[in-house]
Amino acid sequence: MDLRAVAGLVLFCGSAAAQSPAPEQIQRGAAIYERNCSPCHGARMQDPQGAADLRKFPHNERERFITSVSRGKNQMPPWGGMLKPEDIEALWAYVVSAESLYGH
Protein backbone atom coordinates (compact mmCIF):
# COMPACT_ATOMS: atom_id res chain seq x y z
CA MET A 1 0.00 0.00 0.00
CA ASP A 2 1.50 3.36 -0.95
CA LEU A 3 1.64 6.43 1.28
CA ARG A 4 -1.26 8.12 -0.51
CA ALA A 5 -3.51 5.12 0.09
CA VAL A 6 -2.58 5.06 3.78
CA ALA A 7 -3.24 8.81 4.08
CA GLY A 8 -6.62 8.36 2.37
CA LEU A 9 -7.54 5.52 4.70
CA VAL A 10 -6.60 7.60 7.75
CA LEU A 11 -8.69 10.52 6.50
CA PHE A 12 -11.63 8.23 5.75
CA CYS A 13 -11.51 6.53 9.16
CA GLY A 14 -11.09 9.84 10.95
CA SER A 15 -14.05 11.42 9.20
CA ALA A 16 -16.23 8.36 9.81
CA ALA A 17 -15.44 8.44 13.52
CA ALA A 18 -16.19 12.15 13.71
CA GLN A 19 -19.69 11.82 12.25
CA SER A 20 -22.62 12.48 14.52
CA PRO A 21 -24.85 9.53 15.37
CA ALA A 22 -27.92 9.09 13.20
CA PRO A 23 -31.18 10.39 14.72
CA GLU A 24 -32.67 6.87 14.55
CA GLN A 25 -29.76 5.50 16.58
CA ILE A 26 -30.16 8.25 19.18
CA GLN A 27 -33.91 7.54 19.43
CA ARG A 28 -33.22 3.84 19.84
CA GLY A 29 -30.67 4.61 22.54
CA ALA A 30 -33.16 6.89 24.30
CA ALA A 31 -35.74 4.09 24.39
CA ILE A 32 -33.20 1.58 25.72
CA TYR A 33 -32.02 4.14 28.29
CA GLU A 34 -35.57 4.87 29.46
CA ARG A 35 -36.35 1.18 29.87
CA ASN A 36 -33.09 -0.01 31.45
CA CYS A 37 -31.03 2.91 32.76
CA SER A 38 -33.38 5.64 33.93
CA PRO A 39 -34.35 3.97 37.22
CA CYS A 40 -30.81 4.61 38.50
CA HIS A 41 -29.38 7.29 36.22
CA GLY A 42 -32.55 9.43 36.17
CA ALA A 43 -35.06 10.31 33.49
CA ARG A 44 -33.27 12.08 30.64
CA MET A 45 -30.07 11.65 32.69
CA GLN A 46 -31.27 14.12 35.32
CA ASP A 47 -31.09 13.62 39.08
CA PRO A 48 -29.25 10.29 39.21
CA GLN A 49 -29.93 8.55 42.52
CA GLY A 50 -26.36 7.74 43.57
CA ALA A 51 -25.41 6.60 40.06
CA ALA A 52 -22.93 8.29 37.74
CA ASP A 53 -24.18 11.49 36.10
CA LEU A 54 -23.99 10.42 32.47
CA ARG A 55 -24.33 14.03 31.29
CA LYS A 56 -20.74 14.44 32.48
CA PHE A 57 -19.38 11.23 30.96
CA PRO A 58 -16.29 12.09 28.85
CA HIS A 59 -17.17 11.89 25.16
CA ASN A 60 -13.70 10.63 24.33
CA GLU A 61 -14.09 7.51 26.52
CA ARG A 62 -16.40 5.37 24.39
CA GLU A 63 -14.56 2.12 25.15
CA ARG A 64 -14.82 2.78 28.91
CA PHE A 65 -18.58 3.32 28.52
CA ILE A 66 -19.04 0.13 26.47
CA THR A 67 -17.00 -1.90 28.95
CA SER A 68 -18.88 -0.50 31.95
CA VAL A 69 -22.28 -1.20 30.40
CA SER A 70 -21.28 -4.66 29.16
CA ARG A 71 -19.49 -5.89 32.27
CA GLY A 72 -21.01 -3.71 34.98
CA LYS A 73 -19.23 -1.37 37.34
CA ASN A 74 -19.55 -0.85 41.08
CA GLN A 75 -23.29 -1.15 41.84
CA MET A 76 -24.32 -1.29 38.16
CA PRO A 77 -25.06 -4.81 36.91
CA PRO A 78 -23.59 -6.09 33.64
CA TRP A 79 -25.95 -5.53 30.71
CA GLY A 80 -23.86 -7.37 28.10
CA GLY A 81 -26.02 -10.50 28.40
CA MET A 82 -29.26 -8.58 27.92
CA LEU A 83 -28.27 -5.93 25.39
CA LYS A 84 -26.83 -6.54 21.94
CA PRO A 85 -23.66 -4.66 20.94
CA GLU A 86 -25.74 -2.43 18.66
CA ASP A 87 -28.02 -1.60 21.62
CA ILE A 88 -25.01 -0.50 23.67
CA GLU A 89 -23.77 1.57 20.70
CA ALA A 90 -27.21 3.20 20.54
CA LEU A 91 -26.97 3.98 24.27
CA TRP A 92 -23.60 5.59 23.65
CA ALA A 93 -25.09 7.66 20.81
CA TYR A 94 -27.83 8.82 23.17
CA VAL A 95 -25.41 9.69 25.99
CA VAL A 96 -23.06 11.72 23.79
CA SER A 97 -26.01 13.46 22.14
CA ALA A 98 -27.86 14.32 25.33
CA GLU A 99 -26.08 17.66 25.66
CA SER A 100 -27.49 18.84 22.35
CA LEU A 101 -30.88 17.21 23.03
CA TYR A 102 -31.42 18.64 26.50
CA GLY A 103 -29.12 21.65 26.56
CA HIS A 104 -26.78 20.47 29.33
Image (cartoon, helix red, strand yellow):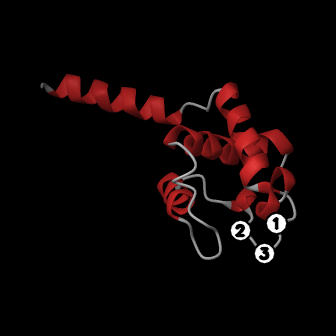
Image coordinates of residue 83 in percent, x first then y, are 57, 47
Tell me which corner region of the image, top left, top right, bottom left or bottom right, holds residue 4.
top left
> Left of 104 or right of it: where is 36?
left
Asked if the residue at tag 2 contacts the one at tag 3, i.e. Cβ–Cβ closer than 8 Å, the answer is no
Determine which residue is flagged by label 3: 50
Q: Amino acid at mark 2?
A: Ala
Q: CA distance from mark 3 to mark 2?
A: 7 Å
Camera-side residue of 98 and 73: 73
Image coordinates of residue 29 in percent, x first then y, are 68, 40
Vertical placement of 83 versus 40: above or below?
Answer: above
Determine which residue is flagged by label 2: 52
Q: Amino acid at mark 1?
A: Pro
Tell me which corner region of the image, top left, top right, bottom left or bottom right, holds residue 45.
bottom right
Residues packed near mark 2 inside 10 Å, few (<14), some (14 to 19) or many (20 plus): some
Tell me which corner region of the image, top left, top right, bottom left or bottom right, holds residue 11.
top left
Residue, x 83% and y 59% (percent of image)? 42
Camera-side residue of 39 and 5: 39
> Left of 17 or right of it: where is 12?
left
Image coordinates of residue 13 in percent, x first then y, are 38, 31
Camera-side residue of 12 and 40: 40
Secondary structure at badge 2 equals loop
Determine which residue is flagged by label 1: 48
Q: Amino acid at mark 3?
A: Gly
Q: Quadrant of the N terminus?
A: top left
Residue, x 78% and y 64% (percent of image)? 40
Q: CA distance from mark 3 to mark 1?
A: 6 Å
Image coordinates of residue 87 in percent, x first then y, are 59, 41
